[in-house]
C-alpha cells in the first residue's frame, strides 16, 4: 500500500480545534467545579447523608428494571428484524429507532397525555417511558449481530446431538452475549442518569442522582454538594462499564461474519410475525398520536385553544412560546454548524492516525462520561465574570449542545472516513489533483452523506437536550424542552394544552431532522453532477 | 524520454528498490516482468511520485522530476484495482483530469464521451461505478488516465483477473489504441505473453538492478 508520507503531519493539526474546544468547555469547567467549589467537608457531608444512599439505590434498581422491561419489549421485534426477511422490515426498523432521538421531554409529555390519571406520575410511568426510548438501542445493537449469525453452527450442533435448549445456551447465547451486554450497558447508563423523564413523570418524590444534582445546584445553591454527587454518579457509571466489560470480554466468540442469511416467515410464524410487526408500530406510534390529540384538547373538550395561545404568543410566567421556538431554532442551527466542523476535524484525525489515533478517540467520547447537568453546572461556575460571563448568552447553550452531540457525531463520521482509501487519493493525484483538491474531491466528497447525517443528528440532539439547557437557559429565552417542562410544572388546562402543542411542534421538528439523517445518510445513486469543490 | 537512474526506495521498513535504472524512449512501450513482490509496482509508484525516493533520480524529456509532486508530473497510471472514484459516475471519472485543469463543463462531457467511445464504452457515461463489470471498469480506468494526456502511461498488471476471452479482446484493443496514439507506456506484468503483446520490448525486473 502506498501511503503518502507527507499526509500525516498535515492532518495532525485538524485535531487542534476540537481539542481546544473540549479543553475550554469540558476539561476547564470540570477542573474549576471540583478544584474551586468542593471542600472535604462537602464530600463527607454528602456521602454520609441518608438521602444520598436512598437516591443512589433508587437510581440503580430503577435503571435495572428499565433494562429488563426494555428487553422484554424490544426483543420480539429485534429477533424478527435480525433473523427474517419480510415486507415492511425497513419500516419496522426505522420506526422503532424514532424513540431514541425524540427529546426526553417530549416523550415524557406524550406519556402524560397517554397514561390514565392515577399512574400519570409514578415509577410505572418512568419505567415505561425509559423502555420506549431504548427499544431503538436494543434493536440497533443486537439485530446486526443476529443478522450475521451463521445458522450452520446451529445445524452443526444439532447433528452432534444438542437439544434446543442446549443450542440456545451453547451456540446462540455466546454469539449474541457481547451485543446484549453492550446494549444493556447503554440502556442502564441512560436510565441511571435520566433527568427529564424522572422530573416530569416521577412526581416530586422520585429522584435520580442526576435530578438530585440539578435540584441541589439550582434550587438550593449547594454547588459543592452537587459536584460531589456528580463525581459519585460518574464513578458508578465507570463501575458499570468495567463490570460490563468483564462480562463480555470474549465478544467475538461464536461469531462468524457471513453474508446474512435471513429466513422467510412461513405458516404460523407469519401470524406471529405480523403480530410483532403491528404491535411494535403501535407501541411506537401510540404516544406520539396521544400527544397530537392532547394538543387539540383543553380540559375535557376538543379545542384548538392551545394552538391559538401559542400562535398569539400567550406568555405564561416568563415563558413565551414563540420565543422558545425561535430560541430552539437558532440554538440548533449554531450547534449544528459548530458541532459538524469540530466533528469533521476530529474524525479526520482519528481515521488518518489509525492505531495512533486511539487516544483521540477516547477523548472524543469522554464528554459522554460527564452528564449534561454536571457540564451545565461546571460552565455556570466557570464562565461567571468579566468578559467571559457567558452564562446568560443564548449561544452558550449552542456551545454546550455542540459538545453533548460531539461524541455521537464523531462516532458516526469515523467509519465513513475509512472508506477513503489512500490509493483513491493517489489516483486523483496522478490525474493532476493538488492536495487541497484531493481533500475536497475525494475525502470530503465520499464522506458527504455521513456529514449530512451527522448534522441531522446534532440538530436532533440540540432540539431535544434538556439537562444542560435547563441549567443555562435564561428565563424568557428558554429552549423548547425547557419551556415545555416549565409549562408542565404549572397547573391549568390551557397551560397544559400549550405544553402539548409545543411538544407536538418539537416532535415534528425532530422527525424532520431524522428524515435528513435517513435521506442524507444514503449514498445517492447518481452522486451529484455538480461539484462544490473550489476552482483553483 | 523517461530516465530512471539508480533509484532506491523503501516501503515502511523494507528496502524494496535498490538501484533500479531504466530508460524508455518517446513513444516506446516497455514491459517489465518479474515474480510478485519483487518491486515492480513500487517502481511504477516511484515514477508516479507516490513513493518517495531515498536515493536516485528520475527525469522526463531532460527535466528532472525527482522532486516534482505527483499532480504536476504529467505521468498517468492505471492501478491494478482501477481505483475508480465511487462518488462520481463514469463520465465524471473519465473527465476528472479535465475538471481539475479547469476545462468547461460542456467541453468536458464531449471529451469524456469521445474517450469512452475510443475504449468501446460509448453511452456508458451516466452509469455508476458499482454497476461496471471487471472489463468495463478497466476500460474506464484507461479512458480516465488517457484523457489526462499523460506523457508517460504506467500500467500495473492491466489484465489480471479478467477471464480468457475478455483478456484477449482487451489486449488487442489496447495495442490498437496505443499504436494509434503513439503513447509511451511502461507496463508491469507477471504474464510474459501479455507483456510481449502490448510492448515493443520486454525486460526482466532483475535486469534493471546493478550487477
Image (cartoon, rainbow, N blue to C red):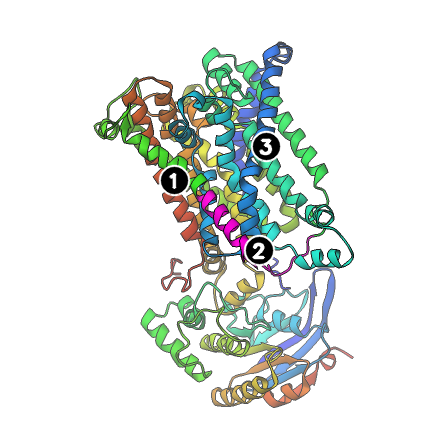
Location of the C terminus of chain B by quadrant is bottom right
| Label 3 vs label 2, nearer the camera | 3
Residue A407 appearing in the image: no
How crowded is the residue under tag 1: few (<14 C-alpha within 10 Å), some, or many (20+)? many
- Taking B168 as reference, is A108 left or right? left
Q: Residue furthest front?
A: A268
Q: Residue A462 appears in which quarter of the rendering?
A: top left
Rendering coords of residue B174 (x, y %)? 53, 86
Question: Which residue is denoted by mark 2 in the rendering?
Answer: A7
Query: In this picture, is A170 found above or below A289?
Result: below
Question: Which residue is denoted by mark 1 in the rendering?
Answer: A510
| Magenta region includes residue A306 | no
Mark 3 and mark 1 residues within 8 Å of each other at the beta carbon: no
Q: Which residues are magenta?
A: A255-281
- State how far apart marks 1 and 2 are (Cα): 39 Å
Task: Please check whether the numbered discs 1 and 2 fall on a single chain.
Answer: yes
Which residue is found at the position 37% from the left and 22% from the top?
A: A488
Which residue is found at the position 46% from the left and 18% from the top?
A: A203
Q: Residue A308 appears in which quarter of the rendering?
A: top left
| Label 1 vs label 2, nearer the camera | 1
Mark 1: which secondary structure?
helix
Which residue is found at the position 63% from the left and 86% from the top?
A: B194
Rendering coords of residue A323 (x, y %)? 29, 28
Mark 2: which secondary structure?
helix
Amino acid at each position: 500500500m502506498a501511503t503518502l508520507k507527507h499526509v500525516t503531519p498535515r492532518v495532525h493539526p485538524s485535531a487542534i480545534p476540537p481539542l481546544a474546544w473540549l479543553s475550554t468547555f469540558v476539561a476547564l469547567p470540570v477542573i474549576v467545579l471540583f478544584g474551586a467549589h468542593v471542600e472535604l467537608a462537602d464530600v463527607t457531608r454528602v456521602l454520609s447523608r441518608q438521602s444520598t444512599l436512598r437516591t443512589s439505590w433508587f437510581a440503580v434498581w430503577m435503571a435495572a428494571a428499565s433494562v429488563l422491561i426494555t428487553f422484554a419489549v424490544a426483543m420480539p421485534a429485534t429477533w424478527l428484524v435480525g433473523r427474517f426477511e419480510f415486507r415492511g422490515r425497513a419500516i419496522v426498523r426505522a420506526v422503532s429507532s424514532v424513540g431514541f432521538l425524540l427529546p426526553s421531554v417530549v416523550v415524557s409529555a406524550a406519556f402524560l397525555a397517554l397514561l390514565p390519571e392515577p399512574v400519570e406520575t409514578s415509577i410505572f410511568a418512568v419505567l415505561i417511558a425509559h423502555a420506549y426510548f431504548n427499544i431503538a438501542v436494543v434493536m440497533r445493537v443486537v439485530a446486526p449481530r443476529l443478522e450475521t449469525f451463521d445458522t450452520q453452527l446451529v445445524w452443526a450442533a444439532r447433528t452432534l446431538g444438542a437439544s434446543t435448549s442446549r443450542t440456545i445456551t451453547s451456540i446462540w447465547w455466546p454469539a449474541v452475549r457481547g451485543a446484549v451486554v453492550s446494549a444493556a450497558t447503554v440502556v442502564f447508563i441512560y436510565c441511571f442518569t435520566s433527568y427529564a423523564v424522572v422530573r416530569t413523570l416521577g412526581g416530586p418524590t422520585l429522584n435520580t442522582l442526576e435530578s438530585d444534582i440539578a435540584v441541589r445546584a439550582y434550587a438550593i445553591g449547594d454547588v459543592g454538594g452537587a459536584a460531589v454527587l456528580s463525581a459519585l454518579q460518574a464513578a458508578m457509571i465507570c463501575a458499570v462499564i468495567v463490570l460490563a466489560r468483564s462480562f463480555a470480554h470474549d465478544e467475538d466468540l461464536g461469531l462468524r461474519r457471513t453474508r446474512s442469511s435471513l429466513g422467510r416467515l412461513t405458516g404460523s410464524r407469519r401470524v406471529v410475525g405480523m403480530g410483532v410487526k403491528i404491535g411494535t408500530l403501535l407501541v411506537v406510534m401510540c404516544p406520539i398520536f396521544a400527544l397530537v390529540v392532547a394538543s387539540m384538547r383543553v380540559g375535557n373538550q376538543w379545542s384548538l385553544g392551545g394552538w391559538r395561545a401559542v400562535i398569539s404568543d400567550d406568555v405564561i410566567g416568563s415563558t413565551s412560546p414563540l420565543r422558545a421556538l425561535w430560541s430552539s431554532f437558532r440554538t440548533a442551527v449554531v450547534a449544528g454548524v459548530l458541532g459538524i466542523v469540530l466533528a469533521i476535524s476530529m474524525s479526520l484525525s482519528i481515521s488518518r492516525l489509525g492505531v495512533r489515533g486511539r487516544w483521540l478517540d477516547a477523548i472524543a467520547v469522554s464528554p459522554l462520561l460527564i452528564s449534561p447537568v454536571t457540564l451545565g453546572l461546571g460552565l455556570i461556575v466557570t464562565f461567571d465574570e468579566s468578559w467571559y460571563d457567558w452564562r446568560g448568552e443564548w449561544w452558550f447553550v449552542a456551545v454546550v449542545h455542540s459538545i453533548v452531540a460531539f461524541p455521537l457525531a464523531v462516532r458516526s463520521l469515523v467509519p465513513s472516513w475509512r472508506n477513503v482509501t489512500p490509493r483513491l487519493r493517489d489516483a486523483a493525484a496522478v490525474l493532476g489533483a493538488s492536495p487541497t483538491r484531493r481533500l475536497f474531491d475525494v475525502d470530503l466528497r465520499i464522506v458527504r452523506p455521513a456529514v449530512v447525517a451527522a448534522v441531522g443528528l446534532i440538530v436532533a440532539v440540540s432540539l431535544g437536550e434538556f439537562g444542560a439547557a435547563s441549567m443555562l437557559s435564561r428565563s424568557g429565552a428558554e429552549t423548547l424542552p425547557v419551556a415545555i417542562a416549565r409549562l408542565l410544572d404549572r397547573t391549568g388546562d390551557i397551560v397544559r394544552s400549550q405544553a402539548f402543542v409545543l411538544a407536538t411542534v418539537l416532535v415534528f421538528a425532530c422527525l424532520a431532522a431524522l428524515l435528513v439523517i435517513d435521506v442524507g445518510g444514503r449514498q445517492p445513486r447518481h452522486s451529484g453532477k455538480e461539484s462544490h469543490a473550489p476552482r483553483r | 524520454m523517461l530516465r530512471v537512474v539508480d533509484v532506491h526506495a523503501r516501503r515502511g521498513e523494507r528496502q524494496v528498490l535498490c538501484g533500479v535504472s531504466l530508460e524508455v524512449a518517446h513513444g516506446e512501450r516497455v514491459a517489465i516482468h518479474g515474480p510478485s513482490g519483487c518491486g515492480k509496482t513500487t517502481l511504477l509508484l516511484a515514477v508516479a511520485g507516490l513513493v518517495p525516493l531515498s536515493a536516485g533520480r528520475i527525469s522526463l524529456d531532460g527535466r528532472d522530476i525527482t522532486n516534482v509532486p505527483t499532480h504536476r508530473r504529467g505521468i498517468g497510471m492505471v492501478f491494478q484495482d482501477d481505483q475508480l472514484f465511487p462518488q462520481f459516475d463514469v463520465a465524471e471519472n473519465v473527465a476528472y483530469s479535465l475538471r481539475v485543469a479547469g476545462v468547461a463543463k460542456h467541453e468536458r462531457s464531449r471529451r469524456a464521451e469521445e474517450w469512452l467511445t475510443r475504449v468501446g464504452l460509448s453511452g456508458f457515461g451516466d452509469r455508476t461505478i458499482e454497476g461496471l463489470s471487471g472489463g468495463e471498469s478497466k476500460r474506464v480506468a484507461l479512458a480516465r488516465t488517457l484523457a489526462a494526456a499523460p506523457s508517460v502511461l504506467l500500467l500495473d498488471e492491466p489484465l489480471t483477473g479478467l477471464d480468457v476471452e475478455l483478456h484477449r479482446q482487451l489486449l488487442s484493443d489496447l495495442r490498437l489504441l496505443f499504436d494509434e496514439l503513439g503513447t509511451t507506456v511502461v507496463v508491469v506484468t507477471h504474464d510474459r505473453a501479455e507483456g510481449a503483446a502490448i510492448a515493443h520490448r520486454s525486460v526482466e525486473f532483475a535486469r534493471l538492478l546493478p550487477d
